[in-house]
Amino acid sequence: VQLQASGGGLVQPGGSLRLSCAASGFTLTYTTIGWFRQAPGKEREWIAGLRRNDGRPYYTDSAKGRFTISRDTAKNTVYLQMNGLKPEDTAVYYCASGERTILSSMRMVSEYDFWGQGTEVTVSS
């Protein structure tokens, strides 16, 4: 079982990036996928999630209207499209898989079983 996150990079404020989370060894559709980020000196925080099976998306307030989480079942990949990026979005972004379907649990780092290695996003002019 493996998750591989990719797509990070350096982008100017207002720019966009699309992060990918590719899974191997299991089918993403049957798991809840969360995107988290961790800025230097800060705790890892949940920013978006895709509930298993029905694929319902959830977002933290800072992500609503700017980020979109989606999945491609054929590619067994979940994406995080990030638009309108701000310097405060600078962080290492991680995807993770778990089984929880209740939002309060989906937001918790401890409720995820497998993690990708992280991809760094820097928003700077």
Image: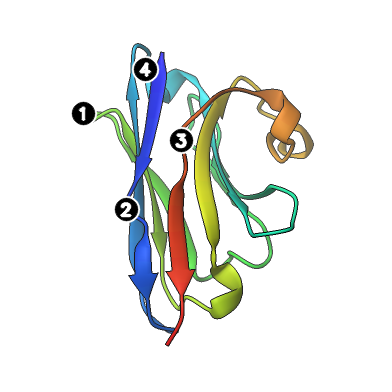
Q: Residue furthest bottom?
A: 125
> Could you say which is closer to the camera, residue 68 or residue 34?
34
Q: Is residue 36 left or right of residue 19?
A: right
Task: Between label 2 and label 3, give the one nearer the viewer.
Answer: 3
Q: CA distance from mark 2 to mark 4?
A: 21 Å
Please give the label number shown on residue 117: 3
Q: Quadrant of the N terminus?
A: top left
Residue highlighted by disc 1: 74
Residue 34 location in percent, x, y?
56, 38
Residue type pointed to by label 1 = Ala
Task: Between label 1 and label 3, give the one nearer the viewer.
Answer: 3
User: Mark 1 and 4 residues: CB-CB less than 8 Å, in contact?
Assistant: no
Q: CA distance from mark 1 to mark 3?
A: 22 Å
User: Label 4 neighbourhood size at 10 Å, few (<14), some (14-19), many (20+)?
Assistant: some
Q: Is residue 26 left or right of residue 47?
A: left
> Could you say which is closer to the camera, residue 76 or residue 112?
112
Q: CA distance from mark 2 to mark 3?
A: 12 Å
Residue highlighted by disc 2: 7
Q: CA distance from mark 1 to mark 2?
A: 19 Å
Residue 36 location in percent, x, y?
59, 46
Q: Residue at x 74, y 27 (%)?
A: 110
User: Label 1 neighbourhood size at 10 Å, few (<14), some (14-19), many (20+)?
Assistant: few
Residue type pointed to by label 4 = Thr
Say which element carries label 3: loop
Q: Residue at x 47, y 35 (%)?
A: 55
